[in-house]
Image (spheres, rainbow, N blue to C red):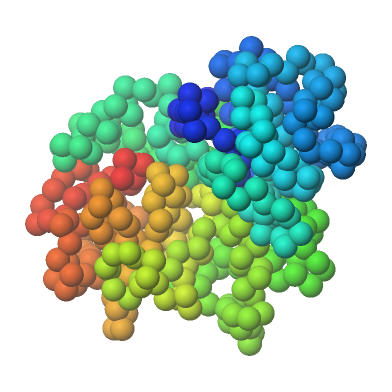
């Protein structure tokens, strides 16, 4: 499968300022697959080490973390000749070995000619523990996300379709109706399957949504195992309560996160650590309300008002136990959930494109789903799950703040009118 991370890795390899790379992201987003594929294509050989499947590796790093000491031993352990500039060294699940992470500092300072990438599914959690000696300023860091809708289409071999969508987005030009409907069909499949590579691959192999759901359930189970393994008993219970409640929150008309829906009488002080753990693990995305759409947006966020979205829309549907047919055929029984589900999808696409997301809400209940900084401009985004073009909140925002333009995402075709750029939901990756 073609992943956008490969382009970044290629630029990293060529950079004269290259440092050891930390590739972080939630479990099963494709970190190891992408790293090893890149290594095979662009290096003479790959020396791969997994601290989860081979915990005895820790002893090697306990003895010394100097490159001159480590490289000969690692070469022997991997049965690969580790050559400067020509071998890719990979440390996987590195959050399980603190000293391996610390060793990156010495590779950067004393042996920069060695190319090293480290990965881990819970690096965000591990790096925020006080006992970790993080190599500040000595590493490059990149976060990897599930496949966005563009990568999903490319996995199906739809290269020309991707080019057409991007061209229509750029020119605000309607796509032919038959192709528009085909894109919407792919989009609905994506809502069911999501962007985790194993799920996409399973569907490509079998065209069976039931088998895809089985894979999703196994991934959800692995998330729960991580929560119990890397949390105390009391924190695990709170973390699971928050995670289980996200689908409930997204079914509400107001998707702002409410502690009382997690547990009666719950307060921020009780649940904040659980939310932070889920965020650092890459399992969820938290976006804050901004009071004023001014630069820098971060300065105007309200830390007490936020929404939470699951990092993969396919897992969201699996967690809610929604059958594929209800999404593929637009069942009315999903009406209460459609809005939150589609918001979650759009959030995933924006995050994958590198945007820091916020939302705006007035004191009188008007709300714009997303506010982003795009090409140096603050752009409001309104999301509709169907063709409904009424957007009173967006109109209020435009009247009050006069943005350069606004974006409306729905199932309608491309267009531009009255300062609003209309984009079909399947083209959210273009933003």
Q: Is residue 328 visible?
A: no
Residue reaching furthest left?
418
- Number of numbered discs present? 0
Is 429 placed left or right of 201 in the picture?
A: left
Q: Quadrant of residue 203?
A: top right
Q: Is residue 238 above or below residue 56?
A: below
Q: Is residue 287 visible?
A: yes
The quadrant in which the C terminus is found is: top left
Q: Using the image as rendered, state which of residue 333 and residue 155 is in the foreground.
A: 155
Q: Is residue 135 above or below residue 396?
A: above
Task: Indicate the position of residue 42 as horizontal and vertical percent values.
Answer: 56, 16
Task: Indicate the position of residue 400 as horizontal and vertical percent values.
Answer: 16, 73
At x 38%, y 37%, the residue is: 185
Task: Indicate the position of residue 230 as horizontal and vertical percent values.
Answer: 77, 58
At x 22%, y 31%, the residue is: 167
Residue reaching furthest bottom?
265
């Amino acid at each position: 499968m073609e992943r956008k991370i490969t382009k970044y890795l290629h630029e990293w390899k060529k950079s004269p300022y290259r440092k050891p790379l930390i590739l972080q992201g939630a479990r099963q987003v494709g970190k190891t697959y992408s790293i090893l594929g890149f290594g095979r294509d662009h290096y003479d050989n790959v020396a791969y080490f997994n601290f989860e499947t081979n915990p005895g590796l820790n002893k090697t790093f306990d003895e010394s973390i100097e490159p001159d000491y480590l490289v000969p031993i690692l070469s022997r352990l991997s049965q690969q000749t580790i050559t400067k500039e020509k071998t890719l060294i990979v440390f996987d699940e590195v959050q399980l070995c603190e000293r391996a992470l610390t060793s990156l500092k010495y590779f950067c300072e004393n042996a920069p000619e060695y190319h090293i990438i480290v990965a881990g599914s819970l690096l965000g959690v591990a790096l925020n523990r006080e006992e970790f000696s993080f190599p500040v300023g000595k590493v490059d860091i990149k976060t990897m996300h599930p496949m966005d809708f563009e990568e999903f289409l490319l996995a199906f071999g739809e290269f020309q379709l991707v080019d057409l969508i991007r061209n229509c987005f750029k020119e605000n030009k309607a796509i032919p109706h038959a192709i528009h409907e085909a894109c919407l069909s792919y989009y609905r499949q994506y809502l069911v399957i999501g962007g985790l590579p194993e799920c996409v691959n399973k569907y490509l192999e079998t065209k069976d949504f039931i088998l895809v759901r089985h894979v999703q359930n196994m991934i959800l189970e692995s998330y729960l195992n991580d929560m119990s393994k890397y949390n105390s008993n009391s924190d695990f219970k709170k973390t699971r309560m928050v995670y289980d409640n996200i689908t409930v929150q997204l079914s509400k008309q107001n998707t702002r996160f409410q502690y009382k829906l997690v547990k009666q009488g719950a307060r921020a002080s009780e649940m904040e650590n659980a939310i932070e753990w889920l965020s650092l693990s890459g399992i969820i995305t938290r976006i804050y309300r901004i009071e004023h759409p001014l630069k820098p947006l971060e300065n105007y966020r309200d830390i007490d008002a936020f929404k939470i979205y699951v990092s993969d829309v396919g897992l969201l549907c699996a967690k809610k136990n929604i059958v594929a047919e209800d999404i593929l055929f637009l069942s009315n029984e999903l009406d209460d959930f459609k809005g939150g589900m589609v918001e979650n999808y759009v959030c995933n696409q924006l995050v994958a494109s590198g945007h820091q997301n916020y939302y705006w809400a007035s004191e009188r209940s008007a709300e714009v789903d997303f506010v982003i900084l795009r090409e140096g401009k603050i752009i409001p985004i309104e999301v509709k799950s169907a063709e409904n073009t009424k957007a009173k909140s967006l109109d209020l925002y435009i009247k009050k703040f006069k943005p350069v333009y606004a974006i409306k995402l729905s199932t309608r075709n491309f267009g531009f009118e009255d300062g609003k750029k209309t984009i079909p939901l399947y083209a959210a990756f273009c933003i």
